[in-house]
Image (cartoon, rainbow, N blue to C red):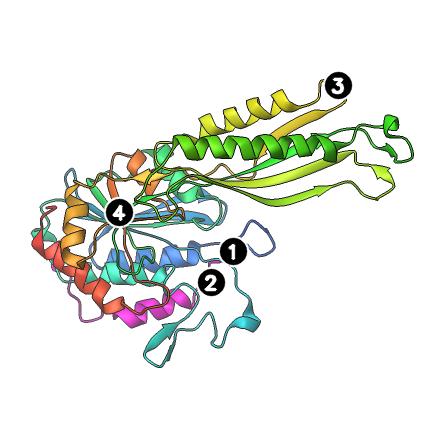
């Protein structure tokens, strides 16, 4: 079947409809929105174009989409998430839910990160007939990347899709990215005993115990940075940020409880589960022997670091076609979940501050036409 159609939507028509379909993802339930309208929009287009379309429920009001053209093992995934971050309306000069063109640039919530990529992937696929695919082309759209990674985790649990390579169209300034750091956010709570400040013996000061915790964390950070280094990253060591602390309720009361929130960005090769175990073990050791309780908990499950080998055929092809060497970033993506499925994965897309939409579409079309993967 030929995927060309006289009624097929244009690239801008698809981008416009995607932007005009809100799908904000937020940990605040009052702001969080369903992504089903976006999934249905993509499913209708792809079904009309001959793709085998599967809508996969993830949670109430949330779903992934797996659309496949062609059959067989191996193949290529073009992947993007359907959700966007929340927005501050007063800071927008354009309607965030309407595609606007201004001075040669397109504006709208999700134009770069990353609804427009899904339209580009569909348009690239339109250039070929189903008979030309020796292995399948899969367009993957996920939910809740901006918050819990629930969509990507659901893929791992289901063990699908199966493919040889994947390209995630996150904005990278058109530089192929084959590595990124992981991220884990942890809460550390010390509980003591409140009392009147006129006599320290009346209580156990959780702020003073937290002082020991922070000193131990800084020591551990130094040790991690001596143990792990990767000069391919702009910041070549794992980082630890002290981002939030709160304790006590009044100057004349002994602090009964104190909570600290930290952010750790591990390098590839550092395991989140092992880091959490070491965090808890080290901090338990520095707690005073009497009067205090220490609890650690993840603020979210975390995103692992990702690394695709430099010699991967996907990396080499992306470097040749873009003219950029594959690099690394400090932010997280859905890539480690696809690599967990045994798929060589890169991240590559138009940068937020530059309009490379046409170039991205041409890159995908050339890549499919070369059929190096097929």
Query: CB atoms at circles 4 and 3 under 8 Å apart?
Result: no
Residue 22 circle label: 2
Q: Secondary structure at mark 4?
A: strand
Residue 155 percent location from the top left of the image: 35, 39
**Residue ID at (50%, 46%):** 60
Q: Secondary structure at mark 1?
A: loop
Which comes before the other along the chain, label 1 or label 4? Answer: 1
**Which residue occupies the foreground of this view, 76 or 273?**
273
Report the side of 289 relative to 102 (left or right).
right
* Eye-nearest disc, 4 or 2: 4
Query: CB atoms at circles 1 and 4 under 8 Å apart?
Result: no
Disc 3: which residue: 290
Instruction: Read off the magenta span.
Output: 1-24
Question: The N terminus is located in which quarter?
Answer: bottom left
Q: Quadrant of residue 98?
A: bottom left
Which comes before the other along the chain, label 3 or label 1? Answer: 1
Disc 1: which residue: 33
Per the model, the C-alpha gap separating discs 1 and 4 is: 28 Å
Residue 196 percent location from the top left of the image: 90, 34
Per the model, the C-alpha gap separating discs 4 and 3 is: 51 Å
Q: Secondary structure at mark 2?
A: loop
Residue 118 vs 65, above or below: the answer is: below
Which residue, as the protein is rendered here, is positioned at the far top? 289
Per the model, the C-alpha gap separating discs 2 and 3 is: 53 Å
């Amino acid at each position: 079947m030929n995927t060309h159609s006289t009624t097929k939507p244009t690239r801008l028509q698809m981008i416009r409809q995607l932007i005009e379909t809100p799908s904000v993802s937020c940990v605040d339930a009052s702001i969080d929105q369903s992504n089903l309208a976006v999934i249905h929009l993509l499913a209708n287009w792809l079904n009309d174009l001959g793709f085998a379309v599967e809508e996969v429920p993830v949670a109430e009001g949330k779903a992934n989409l797996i659309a496949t053209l062609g059959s067989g093992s191996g193949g290529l995934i073009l992947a993007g998430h359907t959700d966007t971050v929340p927005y501050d309306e007063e800071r927008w000069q354009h309607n965030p839910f309407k595609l606007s063109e201004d001075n040669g640039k397109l504006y709208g919530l999700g134009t770069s990160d990353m609804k427009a990529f899904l339209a580009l992937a569909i348009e690239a696929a339109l250039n070929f007939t189903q008979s030309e695919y020796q292995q399948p082309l899969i367009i993957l759209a996920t939910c809740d990347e901006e918050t819990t990674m629930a969509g990507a985790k659901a893929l791992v649990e289901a063990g699908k899709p199966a493919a040889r390579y994947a390209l995630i169209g996150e904005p990278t300034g058109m530089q192929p990215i084959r590595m990124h750091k992981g991220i884990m956010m942890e809460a550390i709570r010390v509980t003591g005993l409140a009392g009147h400040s006129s006599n320290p013996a009346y209580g156990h000061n959780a702020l003073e115990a937290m002082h020991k915790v922070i000193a131990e964390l800084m020591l551990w950070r130094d040790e991690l940075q001596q143990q792990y280094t990767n000069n391919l990253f702009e910041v070549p060591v794992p980082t630890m940020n002290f981002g939030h602390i709160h304790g006590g309720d009044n100057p004349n009361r002994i602090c009964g409880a104190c909570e600290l929130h930290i952010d750790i960005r591990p390098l590839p090769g550092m395991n989140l589960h092992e880091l959490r175990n070491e965090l808890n073990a080290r901090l338990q050791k520095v707690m005073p022997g009497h009067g205090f309780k220490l609890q650690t908990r993840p603020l979210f499950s975390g995103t692992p670091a990702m690394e695709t080998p430099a010699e991967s055929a996907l990396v080499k092809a992306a470097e040749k076609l873009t003219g950029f060497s594959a690099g690394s970033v400090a932010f997280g993506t859905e890539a480690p979940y696809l690599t967990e499925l045994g798929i060589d994965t890169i991240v590559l897309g138009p940068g937020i501050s530059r309009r490379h939409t046409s170039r991205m579409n041409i890159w995908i079309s050339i890549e499919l036409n070369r059929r190096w993967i097929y």
